[in-house]
């Protein structure tokens, strides 16, 4: 079995059932299969072949779902691009992945067009919606001419399904290779442990389906359940959609839960259909979770995973989301739950020894759903799979009942609104400013985003710069979520005896009194 088999089986079981809904279009399983096959055949007709990489830069839409179904049907490799990235960040991924084609939304034609001449292997650019600028091709025109029949590309478990990029501590993004076996195991994990999906269920997705929320799509399809994709998180639009479509399931990140809780008209719409709110991507503050349970009821499930490990590795179930009970049970609200059926999750020390309950170490995992390797990076692959375990670089501990508690991140990674930010990448940009002598970047607590990026900067003698100037400078070189939102100016940054800047010393005052150093 591979992901394409799931779509074929869905169309056979529920041919006339509406399974994909967006503000622009509603598709039955039969219609989605036909359009996906048209995309697959269109890509093959353009001269691409099985195994070729196809980058995707699309806002949530029915096309974003059917395009990755089509790429899969063609036996090609989907390379998701982050819509918040800068042109230079896109260029690095296109070249490193050796992508041969890009499917993009009309709103991204300018940013991709500006770097296209440097994209070494791109031969085709396909534009969704609007009139594409030459030499870009029209998505709808291509699939209108293509065959709706199965291209019958033979696939194996070892064929690469997706190549996703995650930033590393060096600042260079790393390509995470997920093969068909890993994709299917993640699919099984969602069905076995994650959600009790029924044919009358309706899931609404507001975060990018090219990333984590996309893991919810195939499990709902195979049950004949509806998938509603919205272009982004708009609280009012989402609440209206819940009422109109009788949505039973949401996939959110903590930031969007907070935004919903602060929505003045939260109860204006009929939300009685909601049965499950699945959340993840970043930790949630227990106090926020308590407010959410009080507002929505016992509907929450938390999933923990990472790009390298897929979702989910652990789950905190509805039964664990309680507001009364023993102190031990209440504490579990701060955990990410227990390992899923087909994954092993342990805590390991620096010497590779498993640690007993209560002792803090690195969270490690084993499962067929974890990545195969880092693309073209054997050194990083070997480091991450030391001793046969995937090293997550998240620090935490297990309690005596097997619940996993996150404590800190090994590499000072910042998670802001569900997006990963690595300090060195931001620091490298700050050092480009002519007035900056030294810079350190770290995460500080933020009520809405969980964490936000703060920079500590020392200036060169005789030079000046304002906070606004540093932030505006960063915006020119980084995706918006990576730029500092505040800057501290310090005469000399703290360092250890080897001259390394001590980020932890800078970060500590902002997290004083907090049980864990992530939010």
Image: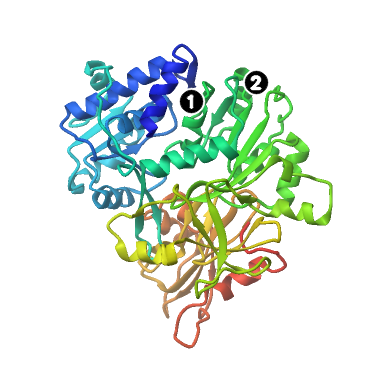
Quadrant housing the N terminus? top left
Q: Is residue 302 left or right of residue 178?
A: right
Residue displayed at 68% across by 23% down: 273
Number of numbered callouts drawn: 2
Q: Is residue 370 visible?
A: yes
Snapshot quadrant of residue 486: bottom right
Give the camera-side residue of 436 and 368: 368
Residue linked to disc 2? 243
Quadrant housing the C terminus? bottom right
Q: Which mark is residue 221?
A: 1
- Please name which of the two marks, 2 or 1, marks the residue nearer to the observer: 1
Image x and y of residue 62, in percent? 42, 25
Work out how far the residue at label 2 is from the one at label 1, CA to CA, in angstroms: 21 Å
Disc 1 on helix, strand or loop?
helix
Residue displayed at 30% across by 34% down: 103
Q: Is residue 189 left or right of residue 146?
A: right
The residue carrying pointer 1 sits among few (fewer than 14), some (14 to 19) or many (20 or more) residues within 10 Å by Cα, namely many
Snapshot quadrant of residue 431: bottom left
Q: Is residue 262 visible?
A: no
Residue displayed at 68% across by 35% down: 263
The residue carrying pointer 2 sits among few (fewer than 14), some (14 to 19) or many (20 or more) residues within 10 Å by Cα, namely some
Q: Residue furthest bottom?
A: 497
Give the camera-side residue of 114 and 158: 158
Image x and y of residue 176, in percent? 37, 51
Q: Which mark is residue 413?
A: none
């Amino acid at each position: 079995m591979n992901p394409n088999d799931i779509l074929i089986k869905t169309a056979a079981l529920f041919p006339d059932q509406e399974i994909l809904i967006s503000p622009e279009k509603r598709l039955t399983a039969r219609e989605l299969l036909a359009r996906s096959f048209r995309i697959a055949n269109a890509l093959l007709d353009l001269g691409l072949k099985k195994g070729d990489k196809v980058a995707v830069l699309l806002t949530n839409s029915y096309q974003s779902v059917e395009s990755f179904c089509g790429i899969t049907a063609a036996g090609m490799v989907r390379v998701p691009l982050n819509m918040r990235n800068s042109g230079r960040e896109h260029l690095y991924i296109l070249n490193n992945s050796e992508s041969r084609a890009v499917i993009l939304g009309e709103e991204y034609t300018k940013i991709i067009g500006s770097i296209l001449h440097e994209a070494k292997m791109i031969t085709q650019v396909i534009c969704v919606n609007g009139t594409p600028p030459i030499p870009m091709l029209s998505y709808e025109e291509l699939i209108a001419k293509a065959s709706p029949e199965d291209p019958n590309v033979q696939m194996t478990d070892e064929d690469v399904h997706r190549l996703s990029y995650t930033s590393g501590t060096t600042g260079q993004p790393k390509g995470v290779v997920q093969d068909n076996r890993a994709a299917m195991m993640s699919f099984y994990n969602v069905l076995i442990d994650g959600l009790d999906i029924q044919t009358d269920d309706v899931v609404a997705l507001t975060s990018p389906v090219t990333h984590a929320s996309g893991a919810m799509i195939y499990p709902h399809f195979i049950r004949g359940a509806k998938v509603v994709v919205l272009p982004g998180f708009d609280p009012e639009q989402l609440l209206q959609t819940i009422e109109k479509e009788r949505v039973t399931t949401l996939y959110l990140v903590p930031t969007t839960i907070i935004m919903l809780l602060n929505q003045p008209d939260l109860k204006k719409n009929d939300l009685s259909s909601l049965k499950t709110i699945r959340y993840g991507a970043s930790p949630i503050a227990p106090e926020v979770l308590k407010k959410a349970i009080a507002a929505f009821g016992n509907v929450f499930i938390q999933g923990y995973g990472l790009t390298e490990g897929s979702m989910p590795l652990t789950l905190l179930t509805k039964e664990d989301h309680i507001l009364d009970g023993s102190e031990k049970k209440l504490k579990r609200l701060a955990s990410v739950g227990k390992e899923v059926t087909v994954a092993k999750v342990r805590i390991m020390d620096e010497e590779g020894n498993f640690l007993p309950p209560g002792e803090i170490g690195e969270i490690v995992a084993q499962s067929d759903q974890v990545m195969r390797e880092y693309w073209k990076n054997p050194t990083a692959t070997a480091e991450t799979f030391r001793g046969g375990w995937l090293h997550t670089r998240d620090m935490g501990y297990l309690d005596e009942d097997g619940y996993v508690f996150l404590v800190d991140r090994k590499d000072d990674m910042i998670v802001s609104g569900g997006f990963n930010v690595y300090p060195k990448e931001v620091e490298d940009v700050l050092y480009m400013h002519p007035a900056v002598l030294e810079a350190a970047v770290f995460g500080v607590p933020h009520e809405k985003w969980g964490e936000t990026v703060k920079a500590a900067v020392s200036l060169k003698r005789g030079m000046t710069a304002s906070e606004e100037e540093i932030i505006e400078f960063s915006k020119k070189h980084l995706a918006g979520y990576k730029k500092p939102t505040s800057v501290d100016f310090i005469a000399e940054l703290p360092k250890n005896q080897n001259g390394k800047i001590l980020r932890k010393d800078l970060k500590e005052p902002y997290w004083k009194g907090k049980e864990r150093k992530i939010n």
